Every structure is written in C-alpha cells, then in structure tokens.
C-alpha cells in the first residue's frame, strides 16, 4: 500500500530532471581528486583544483592565493545551473598563513585565511550563470 501511495505522489514529469541532477552529483563525487601545489609564493588556483576537492599548499611562507574566476568554475561544471554547489578543502602546511583573494565574478564570505598547519573547508555556490557569479563561503 505504501508503494502505491508513493507512486501516486511522484510527479513523473520531474523524474528526468531529478535523474540528471543525481547522475551529475555522483559524477562530481566520483571525480574528486587530491591536488598538491608546492609553489613558493602566491598562486591562482584552477577550477579543476577546486572541483577536485582537496588542495595541499606546502611550500614557502605567507601567501595570498587567488580563487579562479566564476567563468572558469562554471565552464568546468557540466550542465551548470544556478544553485549548483560543491565543497572543497585547502590544507596549509606552509610556514605562514594563506590569505584567499577573489577572482572575477567571485564573492567571498566567511573566513578568508588559513593558518599554518590547519585546513579550511569552503562551499562554492553558483549564483548566476548568464553573468557568471559564484559565492565561496569559508565554513
């Protein structure tokens, strides 16, 4: 009986949309990769590094690292739509603090520094696709 009630409450027109989102989410999780960056000094991170999920910064002292542009992030996400989101983590084993700066179309919210010997998790949310915009929030 419960199965019949469930099947009556499903909007069958929305199933293809749901499956598309589900498969996209699974593909995103399956594609997570660890990226090590031993550059001494400031770097501009890539969309692929962010989407990979884990970035290790390991060389040099204090730096200001820059997030990629919103356009680069959106172009790296298949079938990207407003509201699509992902998390990533930056691990700092450098001898100084990393300060994160924005690329074009990025809004940075929350904590923007990563102290030596710590990591910071971020949530990136696509807020506009037509005029590329992404909000990155330190968690």
Image (cartoon, rainbow, N blue to C red):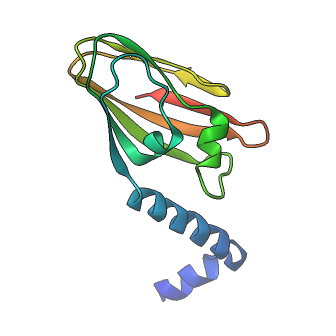
Could you say where residue 101 lies in the image, as x and y percent from the top left?
51, 18
Query: In terms of depth relative to the viewer, which is nearer, 128 or 45?
Result: 45
Residue visible at 64% across and 44% down in the picture: 74
Report the residue at 68% width, 75% height from top: 11
Residue depicted at x 53% and y 30%: 136
**Which quarter of the figure is the C terminus placed in?**
top left
Quarter of image, res 34: top left
Side (left or right) of 118 relative to 138: left
Percent position of residue 125, x then y: 57, 39
Q: Please tell me in which quadrant of the rendered image residue 128 appears.
A: top right
Answer with left or right where residue 2 lies relative to residue 59: right
Please count the marks in the image: 0
- Is 27 placed above or below 13 here? above
Whole-percent x, y for residue 98 in the image: 36, 16
Q: Is residue 93 left or right of residue 129?
A: left
Q: Residue at x 37, y 16 (%)?
A: 41
For residue 14, above or below residue 87: below
Residue 90 to residue 5: above or below: above
In the rendered structure, the answer to whether residue 81 lies left or right of residue 100 reads right
Which of 134/44 is in front? 44
């Amino acid at each position: 009986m419960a199965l019949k009630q469930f099947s009556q409450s499903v909007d069958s027109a929305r199933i293809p949309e749901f499956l598309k989102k589900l498969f996209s989410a699974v593909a995103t999780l399956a594609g997570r990769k660890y990226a090590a960056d031993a550059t001494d000094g400031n770097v501009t991170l890539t969309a692929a590094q962010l989407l990979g999920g884990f970035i290790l910064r390991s060389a040099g002292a204090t730096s200001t690292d820059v997030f990629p542009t919103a356009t680069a992030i959106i172009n790296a996400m298949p079938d990207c739509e407003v509201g699509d989101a992902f998390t990533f983590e930056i691990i700092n084993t450098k001898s100084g603090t990393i300060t994160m700066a924005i690329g074009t179309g990025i809004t940075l919210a929350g904590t923007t520094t990563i102290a030596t010997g710590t990591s910071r998790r971020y949530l990136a949310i696509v807020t506009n696709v037509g005029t590329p915009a992404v909000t990155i929030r330190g968690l």
